[in-house]
Image: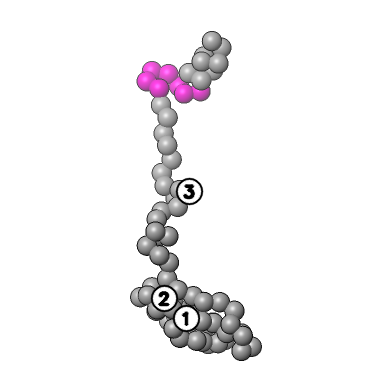
Amino acid sequence: METVTFTVFRKNASEYLSRFEKGEKSNVLRHGRPITEVWPPEKDDLKIASWKKSGLRLTVKGAGLSKAILEEREL
């Protein structure tokens, strides 16, 4: 695992992000103290977020959904 200063990490962020995509890990230091460890996500963390998935479409044949709900509530 490589150790890098925050300044070097910031100036070369694109290069380091490419390294992380390939599986490398790094420690980042600020003023000589470790502030974070950076590594690529686990495979399970790469699933599509629910808010990015297409929405559920509810339909009722022959009638609008809101009308069907209102009729159901009247019963």
Secondary structure of residue under mark 3: helix
Image position, residue 50 (x, y; %):
45, 48
- In the rendered image, residue 65 lying in the magenta stretch gets the answer yes
Tell me the SS state at disc 2.
helix
Please tell me which residue is depicted at 42% across the width and 30% down the height of the picture. Answer: 58
Amino acid type, mark 2 = Phe
Residue 34 image point, x, y percent:
58, 82
Q: Are marks 1 and 2 in contact (CB under 8 Å)?
A: yes
Residue 50 in view here: yes
* Range of residues picked out in magenta: 60-66
Q: According to the image, label 3 marks what residue?
A: 51
Along the horizontal axis of the image, is 6 left or right of 61? Answer: right
Q: In which quarter of the image is the C terminus?
A: top right
Residue lying at 38% horizontally and 18% vertically, measured from the top left: 62
Which of the two residues, 64 or 36, is positioned nearer the viewer here?
A: 36
Task: Tell me how far mark 1 sits from mark 2, CA to CA.
Answer: 8 Å
Mark linked to residue 20:
2
- Which colour scheme appears in the figure? one colour
Residue 23 in the magenta stretch? The answer is: no
Q: Name the residue under label 1.
A: 26
